[in-house]
Amino acid sequence: MSHCIDLTGQRFGRLVVKKRAKTVARNGNVCWECLCDCGKQVVVEGYALRKGITRSCGCLRREVSRHNACHNESFINAQGGALVDKNGIGYSSLIRSKRNHTGVIGVSFDKKSGTYIARLMYHGRYVLNQATRSFDEAVKLRRQAEQQYFNVKEMND
C-alpha cells in the first residue's frame, strides 16, 4: 500500500472529510468521502482538498454565481442586463429575442443533446429548466409554468 496522508476529520473549506473512499482517481490519487456544510456528500481527490482546488460540493460556486448575477454590475452588463419588471419577472421571459429560433419564448433547441429546453426565470431563479425530446412537450411545460407563475391564460409570442 502506498503512503497516504490521513485526512479524516479535517476541514477543507465547506468540506469535512469523513473517511477514505473506496474509489481511487485515474491518476492513482486517494479519494475521500466528504460531507459539505450544505448536507451533500461528495467524493473528492485528496490532492484537490489539500491544495484548495475543491472547497465544497459545488454549492459555493452556485452561491458566488448567484451573488454575481444579482450584484456585480459588470457581470449584469455582460449578460445584457438582467432587466425585470415591477413583478420581478425577467423581460427575457416575456419578450422573444432575435436569437430565438423556435418561435416560442422560453423554448430553445440544444443541438448537442438533440433536446428542446423549456425555461422560465422568476425573481432571478429558474423555476423551470427542463429538457425534453418533443417540441410540443417543451411548449406545454413552458405554458404550464407561465400559468402558475404569471397567472395568465395565454401569453402572446
Image: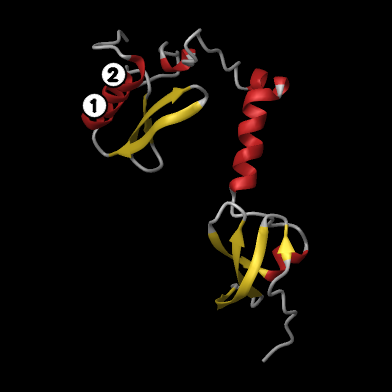
- Residue 49 falls left or right of residue 116: right
Q: Quadrant of residue 54?
A: bottom right
Q: Name the residue under label 2.
A: 147
Q: Residue at x 23, y 31 (%)?
A: 137
Whether 55 is drawn above or below 122: the answer is below
> Which label sits on residue 38?
none
- Residue 81 falls left or right of residue 120: right
Which one is in front, 134 or 149? 149
- Residue 36 falls left or right of residue 131: right
Work out which quarter of the rendered image holds the C terminus and state it: top left
Tell me where residue 117 appears, x and y as whole percent. Answer: 36, 33
Residue 102 visible? The answer is no
Whether 19 is drawn above or below 44: the answer is below
Q: Mark 1 points at which residue?
A: 140
Looking at the rendered structure, the secondary structure element under dot 2 is helix
Which one is in front, 137 or 143? 143
Tell me where residue 87 appears, x and y as whole percent. Answer: 47, 11
Label 2: how many Cα within 10 Å (few below 14, some 14–19, many 20+): few
